[in-house]
Image (cartoon, rainbow, N blue to C red):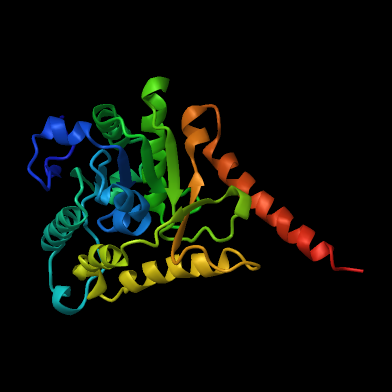
Amino acid sequence: MKYHQSAAQVFVPDSAPEPEAFSRVTHLGIGAHQDDLEFMAFHGILNCYHSKTEWFGGITCTDGGGSPRSGPYAEMSDEEMKRVRIQEQNDAAQVGHFAAMWQLAHPSREIKDPANDALAEELEALLQICRPKVVYTHNLADKHDTHIAVTLAAIQAMRSLPESDRPEKVLGCEVWRGLDWMNDSEKVVLDVSAHENLAMALNGVFDSQIAGGKRYDLATLGRRRANATFFESHATDEADQLSFAVDLTPLVQDPSLDPIEFTTDAIRRFSEDVKDRIAKFLP
């Protein structure tokens, strides 16, 4: 595998030979930044954690540069911060028993350049190697530009694969915007109640961000608990923690679908639901 960035690396936590490690991946997370996988794709990590047949693989697309920093990290240079974030992500892969962890080290500005196909080409090559059944990535209603750019590159990569090699399921997950607004019938509901200790351990690895002033660890678990509690108003909770996702599989299966229309149609259906509920009670 030839990487576009000289700083790109792959880490195999159990030291298996790379061809073996790559081919065993069944669930693949494609995230923009170090820590995105643990926040948005915990469902995949959890399902593979004690399995003998299923393995989670992670891809982090950016180099970790430009991260906010304070406290013990306040005086670090961008290069020093990159090294810290890369190590944190590898530590999380070790804790989560990942099959493999790729860090592609693209600068965010290059990923956000619509004319730059380097990331999509790289993702296509990795997908051909792994052939995962399930892919987790960012949702297209996220409010972080780099997240959107990564998702579009991932969709482009999966569309480029032969139809028989495309993942069975592609999920757009919550990070920089929740998906509680979606109509319930359209949500992919992911039960992530089990092994909260594992979730806490994974989230807590990213000390540079937590100590740097953002309690992502608490916020992520809080969102999952809120999703579970507020999902159903007329029944007791069947799960302690839920994550929501958008089913992006149609965008991969049918390259003629427009990602903008696909996403705004869901927003329009939500808007219609709100209008209908209000209208029922107007004289």
Residue 180 occupies which quadrant of the picture?
bottom right
Taking the view exactly as shown, the residue that stands out farthest to the right is 283
Residue shown at 9% from the left, 38% from the top: 16
Total labels: the figure holds 0
Q: Left or right? Give the position of 272 relative to 133.
A: right
Residue shown at 38% from the left, 46% from the top: 137
Taking the view exactly as shown, the residue that stands out farthest to the bottom is 71
Residue 243 occupies which quadrant of the picture?
bottom left
The spot of residue 132 in percent (x, y) is 32, 34
Residue shown at 20% from the left, 47% from the top: 98
The spot of residue 201 in percent (x, y) is 23, 66
- In depth, the one of 175 and 122 nearer the eye is 175
- In depth, the one of 107 and 124 nearer the eye is 124
The spot of residue 123 in percent (x, y) is 29, 34
Q: Left or right? Give the position of 93 relative to 236.
A: left
Q: Left or right? Give the position of 182 relative to 89.
A: right
Tell me: residue 258, above or below residue 64: above
Residue 114 visible, this orientation: no
Q: Quadrant of the C terminus?
A: bottom right
Q: Left or right? Give the position of 245 relative to 57.
A: right
Residue shown at 42% from the left, 71% from the top: 222
Tell me: residue 160, above or below residue 269: above
Q: Quadrant of the N terminus?
A: top left
Residue 141 visible, this orientation: yes
The spot of residue 216 in percent (x, y) is 33, 69
